[in-house]
Amino acid sequence: MIVNQHDQGWEVIYHRAHALLAAQIAGNWHQQDRPERIIETVAAISHHDDLEKEWEGDHLTKAGAPMDFTIGGETSVPKLRGLTTNSRYRGRWVAMLISMHMSFLNEGKRGESKELDEFLDEQLENQKKWRKELGLSKEEAEKAYAFFQWCDRFSLILCSQELPAGERQLEISQGPDGKRYDVMQNADGHVVVTPWPFAEDKFNVRVEACYLSQVKFESNEELTEALQNAPIKELEWTLIKA
C-alpha cells in the first residue's frame, strides 16, 4: 500500500487502486500513438498489482505504523510466481507485460537467492517464448512495456504526493517513443505533462484513499479492521495541456 502522512494521521492508497489510476492514464493516451493491443495493455496495467493484498501478511513497521510499499521486506518468490502464473489466464500479451514488470522490479536483486535467480531466468525465457508466439520483436515488446511502465510511474507520482512545489518539473520517465516526459503542478492545482501525450486537452483522473486517525497499531489485524472502517475520500487531478 501507499502510505502518506497527513495532519490527522495516515492517508492510505491500496496498490490495486493505484493500478486502476495507471489504467485511467493509459486509457487517455492519444489514439494514434497508442501501443498495439491497447485493451489488453490497459488490462495488464490495471491488474499488475494484484499481488498486493493489504488485508493479508505483515503491513506494519517496527514502530507500529502502516508500512509504505517503498520500505519493503523480503522478496517472496512464491507470491511473484503466483502473480505471473495467474496473469497467463488473461492471455499471453498480458502475461508478457506483467512478466516484464517483474523483471524490471527484481533484476536488481539477482544473486540474493537461488530461488529468485531461477524465477528471473524463467521470466526471461517466458518473455522470449511469448514474443515468438505473438510475432513480436524484442523492440516492439519493449515499446509496449515502456508505455506500461510510464503509466505506472505517473500514477505513483500522483498517489505518493511527489509533485514538486513551486511549479517545478519532475521527470516521469521515457515514454514508448523514447522521449523524456516531465510533469508539473501549476499554482492553480492543474497538472501539466510535457510533451503532451493525451487525446484530450483537459481531463480528470481519480483514485480512492482511506484515512486513519490512529497513528500506531498493535497488530496487522487491528490495522486491517481500521482500514475496513476508515473514511474514504476520492482524490482527483485535472490534467491540462500547456
Image (cartoon, rainbow, N blue to C red):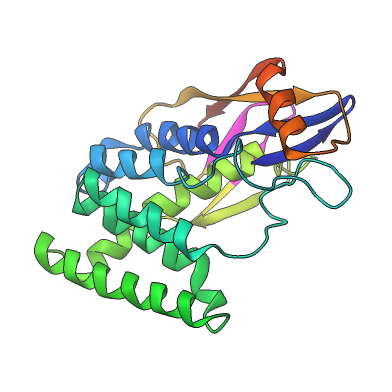
Tell me what residue is drawn at x 69 percent, y 30 percent. Answer: 224
* Vertical arrangement, residue 223 with respect to residue 234, above or below: below
The quarter of the rendered structure image containing the C terminus is: top right
Is residue 126 toward the left or the right of residue 55 in the image? left
Let me know if residue 191 is in the magenta part: yes
* Vertical arrangement, residue 17 with respect to residue 238, above or below: below
Which residue is at the front of the view, 33 or 221?
221
Let me know if residue 142 is in the magenta part: no
The quarter of the rendered structure image containing the N terminus is: top right
Is residue 144 toward the left or the right of residue 240 in the image? left
* Vertical arrangement, residue 187 with respect to residue 183, above or below: above
Tell me what residue is drawn at x 28 percent, y 58 percent. Answer: 96
Q: Position of residue 32 (x, y in %)?
A: 24, 41
Q: Position of residue 167 (x, y in %)?
A: 74, 40
Tell me what residue is drawn at x 48 percent, y 39 percent. Answer: 19
Q: Position of residue 164 (x, y in %)?
A: 75, 44
Q: Taking the image as drawn, is residue 144 in sight?
A: no
Number of numbered discs present? 0
Which residue is at the front of the view, 66 or 168?
66
Magenta residues, start to end:
183-193
Q: Taking the image as drawn, is residue 114 in sight?
A: yes
Q: Position of residue 214 (x, y in %)?
A: 87, 27
Which residue is at the front of the view, 208 or 167?
208
Quadrant of the rendered image containing residue 65: top right
